[in-house]
């Protein structure tokens, strides 16, 4: 099993089991452990001008917390995102915790051209080898004026020490050129650090989920591998070698 399978399949399933046992107020913080903070997710829903009638795709949705967050966002409660993720454990977790419609799929998106008004893909691009293909697929499934939100971990220097396995961080310039090549105009590109801190109650619930995961699975090699991946990512972010970057882009009119 690869480190990515451990992190995005096995640990996703365990996370859902832990959240179910802790109670409903833990579902959302548990489901957003993959990347999202409330401030970041609020920023995306507002910048994307999400409307209740929008057809929305969450590509690489993980445990499903960000999609559920969007569907509960004030004023757009009717929005019903469709989720994709290549990992069966992630799809199962999103269905178990939130009852959201999930499709197990990687970069070849199983949807007709122009099916969605809005798509987001949070913390996904740098885990994908064929980044240009994933962006082209996102462009294809969006309408000609579709809006795209991306949270991307961007390399701030040419060589990264001890990067987590399976990650390929584009530079900011590389990201802009990938987006242009796929048919997107960048509307906004900002550091996600500046979007705000998590409320203390949220942080406490994430910590409780992590403590319970550690208690149940702390000796399991798959947990240790996933933790090692996340520690490496944490070190790159803390040193500034990698920057969490939030992007809003729009399809070129064709
Ligand atoms: C860091 S997690 C982020 C999960 C979720 N978006 C979040 O913010 O909580 C990255 C996710 O991307 C998924 N992924 C990996 N390769 C993918 C691909 N080719 N297409 C779509 N998703 C992919 C992984 O399975 C994993 O669930």
Image (cartoon, rainbow, N blue to C red):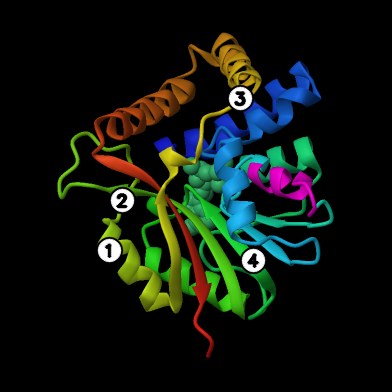
The nearer-to-camera label among 3 and 1 is 3
Residue 74 painted magenta: yes
- Percent position (x, y) of residue 56? 69, 62
- Mark 1 vs 2, N-terminal side: 2
Residue 253 position (above or below residue 224): below
The nearer-to-camera label among 2 and 4 is 4
Mark number displayed over residue 65: none
Mark number displayed over residue 118: 4
Q: What span is in magenta?
A: 66-76
Mark number displayed over residue 169: 2
Left or right, residue 208 beside residue 223: right
Task: Identify which residue is drawn at 55% across, 65% down.
Answer: 148
Left or right, residue 162 beside residue 215: left
- Mark 3 vs 4, N-terminal side: 4
Residue behind mark 3: 199
Disc 4 crowd, CA 10 A, few/some/many (<14, 14-19, 20+): many
- Mark 3 vs 1, N-terminal side: 1
Q: Distance between the residues labelled 3 and 1?
A: 33 Å
Decide which of 220, 186 is in the foreground and name it: 186
- Percent position (x, y) of residue 1? 44, 37
- Percent position (x, y) of residue 29? 65, 29
- Mark 2 vs 4, N-terminal side: 4
Residue behind mark 1: 174
Q: How far apart are marks 1 and 2 (CA)?
A: 9 Å
- Mark 1 vs 4, N-terminal side: 4
In the image, the residue with mark 4 has its CB under 8 Å from the nearest atom of ligand 1: no
Q: Which residue lies most toward the right here?
A: 78
In the image, the residue with mark 2 has its CB under 8 Å from the nearest atom of ligand 1: no
């Amino acid at each position: 099993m690869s480190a990515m399978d451990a992190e995005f399949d096995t640990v996703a399933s365990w996370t859902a089991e832990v959240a179910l046992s802790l109670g409903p107020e833990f579902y959302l913080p548990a489901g957003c452990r993959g990347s999202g903070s409330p401030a970041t997710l609020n920023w995306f829903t507002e910048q994307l001008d999400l409307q209740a009638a929008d057809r929305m795709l969450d590509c690489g949705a993980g445990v499903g917390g960000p999609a559920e967050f969007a569907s509960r966002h004030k004023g757009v409660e009717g929005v019903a995102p469709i989720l994709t993720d290549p990992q069966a454990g992630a799809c199962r977790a999103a269905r178990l915790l939130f009852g959201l419609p999930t499709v197990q799929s990687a970069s070849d998106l199983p949807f007709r051209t122009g099916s969605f008004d809005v798509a987001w893909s949070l913390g996904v691009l740098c885990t994908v080898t064929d980044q240009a293909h994933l962006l082209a697929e996102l462009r294809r499934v969006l309408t000609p004026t579709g809006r795209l939100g991306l949270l991307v971990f961007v390399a701030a220097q040419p060589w990264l020490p001890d990067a987590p396995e399976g990650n390929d961080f584009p530079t900011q310039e590389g990201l802009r050129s990938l987006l242009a090549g796929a048919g997107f105009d960048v509307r906004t590109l900002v550091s996600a650090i500046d979007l705000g801190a998590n409320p203390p109650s949220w942080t406490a619930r994430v910590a409780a989920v992590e403590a319970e995961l550690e208690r149940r699975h702390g000796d399991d090699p798959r947990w240790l591998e996933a933790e090692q991946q996340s520690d490496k990512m944490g070190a790159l972010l803390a040193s500034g070698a990698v920057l969490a970057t939030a992007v809003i882009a729009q399809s070129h009119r064709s």
